Structures are given as structure tokens and as C-alpha cells.
Image: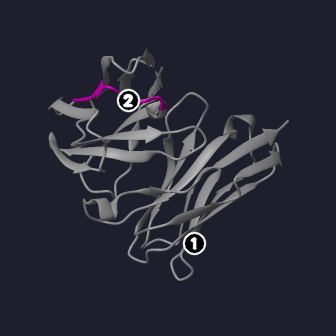
Amino acid sequence: DTEVTQTPKHLVMGMTNKKSLKCEQHMGHRAMYWYKQKAKKPPELMFVYSYEKLSINESVPSRFSPECPNSSLLNLHLHALQPEDSALYLCASSQLDGFGEPLHFGNGTRLTVT
Amino acid sequence: GENVEQHPSTLSVQEGDSAVIKCTYSDSASNYFPWYKQELGKGPQLIIDIRSNVGEKKDQRIAVTLNKTAKHFSLHITETQPEDSAVYFCAASKAGYSSASKIIFGSGTRLSIRP
């Protein structure tokens, strides 16, 4: 089983809804990531938090809002999404910051926007 | 920026045979090359990685080779088993913590093991 836990596993939301995705890790990792994965494609980086501070935003639309309440938790707040935002949203963590480190992925939240 | 090409996109091998997946990268400054396995309904899981100061690394049935001069690296799976069926992603990154250093994934290889 993965050591990065994501909830919910599945989410269906309308374009006017507000929802949040949650991610938790208890490995003491100092960096946490949000990735988006479309079907049959590799993961695409969205956000990176290092020591609870947002360090990278890959020009993600403002309808996606990340939050890192503490070193173990990472949230992704969703508002006014579009159908093309439907995808698998993956959370990951790494022991140290810097990209030359192994990523530990959760099993993702399958999001469908109707 | 970095670009990683991965081949083949699909691969079917008989159980017990070997499978090889190849990747090339463009940025000579890349120095970290992980391989991830993604099973249906799950997130990618690291199976092996190699750094640029090493030419080969092995872990039981899995091995990775790196040719820095040619800028390519390969995953070798020997004695394949049904549980090896999955999508495999190669990736490349470099030291640092900016968008320029981020991990770039290959396009993925769907490996199927025939019984």
C-alpha cells in the first residue's frame, strides 16, 4: 500500500461546485506535489510545496488553489472547473526538496467534471 | 528545456522472457533518471533509479543502464511475470528546485505479459 493517502478516491462535481482534494503523508517528507494525469499520458506537474511554502506553480489556472496546512497535509481546492479538467489528480512527496529525489505518489483522486 | 522520448509505446512479451524499454533525453545537465510503474487504478510507483555517476544498477529482475554520451537509458526486466503488466514511465531531472529542473516524464510504455 502507498504511504501517501489521497481522499476521496473518486469525485464527480458540477462546474459551479466547490470541492477539495486531500493528501496526507507521515514519512516526514519536506516536499509535496500535485500532479494532473490525463488518460494514457504521463503526470504533469501543477504545484510544489517545500517546507510548507509554495515554491513552484506551473502556470495553473486560478480555479485550482493549493494549500499546505502543515508538513503532513496538502489540499487542492477546486472551484468553477471545466469538463476538460476531468483527470486523475496525484499527490506526491519527496524526502528532500529538489527534483533529484524519488517521488512517492498516492493512488490519486479520479475527478469528473460534469 | 528537457525532452524525454520513450519507446516502444506498447510491448507484449511471453511470460519468462525479457522486456526492454528505451528512453533518450536532450539536456546533458540531467543527472537523475527514475523509472516508475503504474498499475491500473493506482499511482506511479518508483521501481528503480540511477544517477549520472553510475552506468548500471540492478535490483533482482530489474536493471537500468545509462549511457551519458549517447544520452539514453534503458530498463531491463528479466524473467517477466504476469504482475509485471503495467505502464512504465521513464523520467529525467537535474539538481535544483525550479521549473527548469522539474522531472520530465517519457510518454509511457504499456507492457503486457502473455501467459
Magenta span has B59? no
Expressed as whole percent of the image width and height from the top left, the position of residue B47 reads 52, 47
Q: Which residue sits at x=31%, y=19%? A: A19
Quadrant housing residue A76: top left
C-alpha span from label 1 to label 2:
31 Å
Quadrant (top left/top right/bottom left/bottom right) for the N terminus of chain B: bottom left
**Which residues make up the magenta segment?**
A73-83
- Name the spot of residue B7 as percent of width and height, x first: 67, 60
x and y percentages locating residue A34 in the rendered image: 34, 39
Q: Is residue A22 left or right of residue B24?
A: left
Q: Which mark is residue A102?
A: none
- Closer mark to the observer between disc 1 and disc 2: 1
Q: Residues within 10 Å of mark 2 (few under 14, many from 20)?
A: some
Q: Magenta-highlighted stretch: main secondary structure?
A: strand
Q: Nearer the viewer, residue B53 or B101?
A: B101
Question: Residue at coordinates 76% horizontally, 54% vertically from top-left?
Answer: B18
Q: Nearer the viewer, residue B106 or B50?
A: B106
State the residue position of label 1.
B72
Q: Residue at x 75, y 41 (%)?
A: B112
| Residue that carries the numbered disc 2 in the rendered image | A3
Type of the residue with mark 1: His
Closer to the camera, A80 or B34? A80
Q: Is residue A74 shown in magenta?
A: yes
Say which element carries label 2: loop
Using residue A80 as the reference point, say whether residue B12 is left or right of it.
right
In the picture shown, does residue A47 fall above or below B76?
above
Q: Residues within 10 Å of mark 1 (few under 14, many from 20)?
A: some
> Is residue A68 toward the left or the right of residue B67 in the image?
left
Check the picture and name the quadrant holding the C terminus of chain B.
top right
